[in-house]
Amino acid sequence: MTEYEKMHGGMIYDCLDEELGAVQKQSHRLCDEYNALGTGDDAKKQAVLRELFPHDDFGLYRTMERPIFIDNMREITIGKNFYSNIHFTFIGGCTAEIGDNVFIGPYCTLATGIHSLIAEERRIFADEDGKLHDYEYGRPVRIGDDVWIASNVTICGGVTIGSRSVIGAGSVVTRDVPCGRQPMQSDPQHNRRGQYVHTSREILDRRSSTP
């Protein structure tokens, strides 16, 4: 079994493996190319995104504000009609699966890689031939359909977020989130600070009345 296969299966693997390194370099190069494009370079942006996500169905749109960082393009799949704000980051180590109609706010990270809690095991070391090794493992991140992830959210490896859920700004998500979970709503039209929260019916009514 190759180190890449071990990583994909959630086993302990050497993250300095050459095959893995080659895929990461390709992913980083495409991100650099994408991030260097200008505001009006929409066609070029879409072309680069098609290279980064060659097997995805983009649906009506795929919009990713710059900059982005995709650590390993082979290990992330994104569904139809996806939007991410600035500084969307996927840290490799295992897989990430994102459903359809997902919105992600600025400065959000999917962190699938996990290091040992034992200090000595986290150290990079050289074998007798002088080759460096760095062992870690990962757990997948799964995000369902119609999820909104607000700004500055970190989703850790091993987490599944159910469809139609909302993740509040500043969250560090370490446990599964059930389908339809909302962030703080004792009063359905006001949050804890008394700020007005539009109900789903109001938004749908506005959409239906738009010419």
Image (cartoon, rainbow, N blue to C red):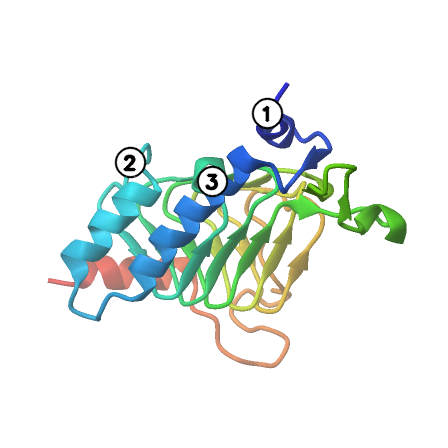
**Quadrant location of residue 127?**
top right
Disc with the residue nearer the chain's start (3 vs 2)? 3
Q: Tell me the residue that label 3 is attached to.
A: 22
Mark 3: few/some/many CA within 10 Å (<14, 14-19, 20+): few
Local secondary structure at mark 3: helix
Mark 2: few/some/many CA within 10 Å (<14, 14-19, 20+): some
Percent x, y of residue 159? 65, 43
Amino acid residing under circle 3: Ala
In this rendering, is residue 5 above or below 182?
A: above
Marks 3 and 2, how far apart in space?
A: 25 Å
Is the N terminus in the top left, top right, bottom left or bottom right quadrant?
Answer: top right
210 lies left or right of 134: left
In this rendering, is residue 123 above or below 95?
A: below
**Quadrant location of residue 208?**
bottom left
Q: Tell me the residue that label 2 is attached to.
A: 57
Q: Nearer the viewer, residue 167 or 39?
A: 39
Amino acid residing under circle 1: Glu
Q: Nearer the viewer, residue 70 or 203?
A: 70
